[in-house]
Amino acid sequence: MNVWFLGIVALWRLALLASLHARVSRLPTSAGVVATVLPVMLVIGTLTLLNLERAVFEVMAGLRYRPPNSVDSAYAVLVLLSLASVYGAMIAIPWYLIECFAAWRTRDAETPG
């Protein structure tokens, strides 16, 4: 039950961040998607590189230590998310830089001068 609640809270936080980017920052949809998922991908990728993903997941989900068993599907999902974040960041980082460059060019074109 804790793992499901952790997933719901994580999705809620992502929705709030996306809403912030859409309403307050007034980012276009493509830039809003990148600005929402890139920080999450970088955090998950960093935890994976430091080999802390399982420990952080267990602490955040409130799981107590138990001996590993063959039905540890939560860990399989965590590994899948970690791999998706590491490889997704390879796409999202250049995308983010392109969005920044496009915003810079648009701002310069609008500035009288």
Image: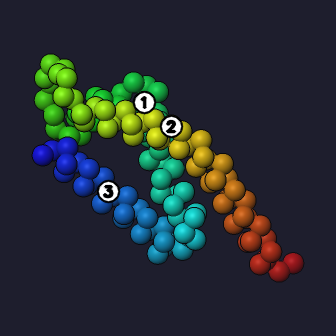
Above or below: residue 45 compared with residue 70: below
Q: Quadrant of residue 16?
A: bottom left
Q: Residue furthest right?
A: 113
Q: Which residue is mark 2?
A: 86
Residue at mark 1 to residue at mark 3: CA–CA distance: 20 Å
**Residue 78, disc:** none
Residue 4 is left or right of residue 75, and the answer is left
- Which kind of residue does numbered mark 2 sit on? Val
Q: Residue furthest front?
A: 70
Q: Residue at x 15, y 19 (%)?
A: 67
Compare marks 1 and 2 and give the one earlier in the sequence: 1
Residue at the disc numbered 3: 11
Q: Are marks 1 and 2 in contact (CB under 8 Å)?
A: yes
Where is residue 15 shown, x and y percent of the image? 36, 63
Q: In the picture provided, is 65 more to the left or to the right than 99?
A: left
The single residue placed furthest to the top in the displayed view is 67
Mark 3 Cα-neighbour bin, 10 Å: few <14, some 14–19, many ≥20: few
Question: Marks 2 and 3: CB-CB under 8 Å?
Answer: no
Disc 3 element? helix
In front of the other: 109 or 69: 69
Could you tell me which quadrant the C terminus lies in? bottom right
Q: What's the residue type where badge 1 is placed?
A: Thr
Task: Give the amino acid at mark 3.
Answer: Leu
Badge 2 element: helix
For disc 1, the marked residue is 48
Q: Work out how far the residue at label 2 is from the one at label 3, CA to CA, in angstroms.
A: 19 Å
